[in-house]
């Protein structure tokens, strides 16, 4: 017998809470794997994670979940119930569309490909990765056919990370960014001889770096009663099904200030989002960020717009200099501000500055679209990579390790993810501008090391909603405009125009 909608909804919620608990338990195990687990735990942990993932998948795709989703009907628009049913349906449909044999094969092939990628990168030998990539790409194409799409198979893959994103709109956005930054990039390339970044290299005690990062994260509003920071090989932010426990990780380089500092600001940005989500959404599909792009907008906002601004360093640089008197004694605020904003075309995406970063992403987007549609073969990928580096950034990588092999994403079967970095970067300025318009006092507060007004605006307009609204809808509600690249280009023009003496 089919239950009435008002009976089905609580039952559905209960089931989804169990799915969320299983996923949260996986999260704790995977956090532990990346922070404290001894090497000997690898095999056992892989089994535990596989078991929890299987149970969660079975519960989500079961006939009982399908029956309750049917019975839940169409709750009233704009309500939490409507969001819950819409998001649960999407997750359920996506999960049932992929045959479990395909899911298992994707998991197997990427498990093999990751160590192959590590070897290939270490030896700068693309041939080691190529056969794996071939296989992974075939499986991704198959997945796209199962998931379904309107215009292009790439969109089926993209939609997993950025619901509703369209290939054609991304092409327009990347074209706008390429055209809008080409002149500025030529100008900064002419300054390549200056060593603006020098103040960031020196001797920086790890413990002191950590302390300073914590001071800034606290000032931003990170709640340590609902979070903690540990060390990991790759910085990340993770939560366990709600806003009550949101953790970040960092790694330190005692000879270089930037990586730990900006990774801490970045991950804190992600964490502030998760800590700000309405706690009643915990253990439901509404918990979590609206999309990867919107999530990235929060990390970029705190890392770049705030963390690389003169206002921010007006307050924090005297403190940082006091902590590192030997390394920074001869560097004044202006020189330090120039250092953290040094820009130049470079080979490596994760080290790229705000001005050139999106071209690294544009290149990957163009290549992965071509790979998925089959107009580019895996064998021709390194050559195509180098040609695009030349086209977008005017340089050729010294070897494939610093070129096509630098990112792990494709070896992990992750296609359609890269654009979310640029979507987030672009949105970060659009959202910050809207906050400024509502509260012109924000820069003045930043100069005093105060961020409550900015965080409050983000909490109210972005964070608390979790996944309730679709990404475009959320942005339009918060800023009054659909997502657009214009504000970001204006921001770059103002900032780098001043830093590099451009009109
Ligand atoms: Zn991020």
Image (cartoon, grey):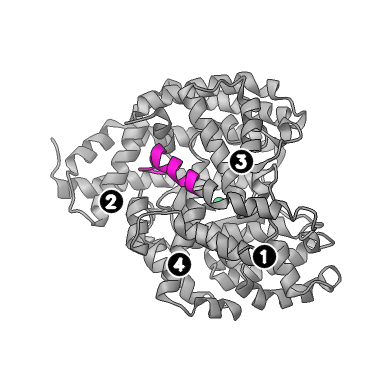
Q: Indicate which disc residue 392 carries.
A: 3
- Determine if the C-beta at disc 2 is less than 8 A from ligand 1: no
Q: Can residue 407 be seen from the camera position used here?
A: no
Q: Indicate which disc residue 433 carries.
A: 4
Q: Is residue 112 above or below residue 417?
A: above
Tell me what residue is drawn at x 39 percent, y 38 percent.
168
Residue in front for this viewpoint, 349 or 97: 349
Instruction: Check the picture and name the quadrant holding the N terminus.
Output: top left
Residues marked 2 and 4 touching at CB (< 8 Å): no
Residue 163 among those drawn in magenta: yes
- Dot 4 falls on a residue whose secondary structure is helix
Q: Of all residues shown, which one is farthest toward the right?
A: 326
Q: Position of residue 23 (x, y in %)?
A: 45, 43
Residues rendered magenta in the picture? 162-176
Q: Earlier in the sequence, mark 2 or mark 1?
A: 2
Residue position for label 1: 501
Q: Indicate which disc residue 83 carries.
A: 2
Q: Is residue 495 above or below residue 322?
A: above
Number of the front mark, 4 or 1: 1
Bin the neighbour count of mark 2 within 10 Å (Cα to Cα): few under 14, some 14-19, many 20 and up: many
- Determine if the C-beta at disc 1 is less than 8 A from ligand 1: no
Q: Is residue 268 above or below residue 103?
A: below
Q: Earlier in the sequence, mark 1 or mark 3?
A: 3
Q: Position of residue 47 (x, y in %)?
A: 56, 31
Measure the C-alpha gap from mark 2 to mark 1.
Answer: 49 Å
- Dot 1 falls on a residue whose secondary structure is loop
Q: Quadrant of residue 495?
A: bottom right
| Prevailing SS of the magenta stretch | helix
């Amino acid at each position: 017998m089919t239950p009435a909608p008002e009976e089905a909804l609580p039952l559905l919620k209960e089931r989804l809470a169990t799915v969320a608990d299983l996923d949260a338990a996986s999260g704790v195990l995977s956090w532990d794997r990346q922070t404290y687990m001894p090497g000997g735990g690898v095999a056992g942990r892989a089994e535990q994670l596989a078991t929890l993932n299987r149970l969660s998948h079975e519960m989500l795709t079961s006939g009982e979940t399908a029956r309750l989703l049917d019975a839940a009907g169409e709750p009233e628009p704009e309500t939490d119930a409507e969001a819950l049913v819409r998001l649960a349906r999407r997750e359920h449909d996506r999960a049932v569309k992929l045959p479990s044999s395909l899911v298992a094969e994707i998991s197997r092939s990427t498990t093999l490909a990751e160590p192959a990628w590590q070897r290939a990168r270490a030896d700068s030998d693309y041939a080691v990765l190529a056969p794996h990539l071939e296989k992974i790409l075939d499986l991704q194409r198959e997945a796209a056919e199962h998931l379904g799409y309107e215009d292009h198979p790439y969109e089926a893959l993209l939609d997993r990370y950025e619901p509703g994103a369209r290939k054609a709109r991304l092409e327009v956005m990347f074209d706008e960014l390429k055209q809008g930054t080409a002149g500025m990039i030529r100008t900064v390339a002419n300054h390549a001889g200056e060593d603006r970044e020098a103040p960031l290299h020196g001797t920086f005690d790890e413990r002191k770096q950590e302390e300073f990062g914590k001071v800034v994260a606290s000032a931003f509003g990170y709640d340590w009663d609902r979070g903690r920071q540990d060390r990991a090989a790759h910085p990340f932010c993770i939560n366990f099904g709600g806003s009550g426990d949101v953790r970040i990780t960092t790694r330190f380089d005692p000879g270089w200030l930037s990586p730990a500092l900006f990774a801490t600001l970045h991950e804190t940005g992600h964490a502030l989002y998760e800590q700000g989500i309405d706690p009643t959404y915990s253990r439901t599909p509404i918990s979590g960020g609206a999309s990867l792009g919107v999530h990235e907008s929060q990390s970029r906002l705190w890392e770049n717009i705030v963390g690389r601004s003169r206002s921010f360093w007006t307050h924090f640089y005297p403190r940082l200099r006091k902590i590192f008197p030997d390394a920074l004694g001869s560097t004044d605020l202006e020189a330090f501000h120039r250092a953290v904003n040094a820009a130049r075309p470079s080979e490596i995406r994760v080290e790229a500055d705000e001005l050139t970063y999106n071209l690294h992403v544009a290149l990957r987007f163009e290549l992965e679209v071509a790979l998925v549609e089959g107009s580019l073969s895996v064998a021709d990928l390194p050559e195509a990579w180098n040609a695009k580096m030349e086209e977008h950034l005017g340089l050729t990588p010294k070897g494939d390790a610093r070129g096509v092999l630098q990112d792990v994403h494709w070896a992990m079967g992750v296609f359609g993810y890269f654009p979310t970095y640029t979507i987030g970067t672009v949105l970060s300025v659009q959202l910050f501008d809207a906050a400024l318009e509502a509260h012109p006092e924000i820069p003045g507060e930043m100069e005093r090391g105060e961020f409550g007004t900015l965080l409050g605006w983000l909490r109210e307009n972005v964070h608390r909603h979790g996944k309730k609204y679709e990404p475009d809808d959320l942005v339009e509600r918060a800023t009054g405009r659909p997502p657009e690249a214009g504000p970001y280009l204006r921001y770059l023009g103002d900032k780098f125009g001043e830093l590099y003496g451009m009109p």
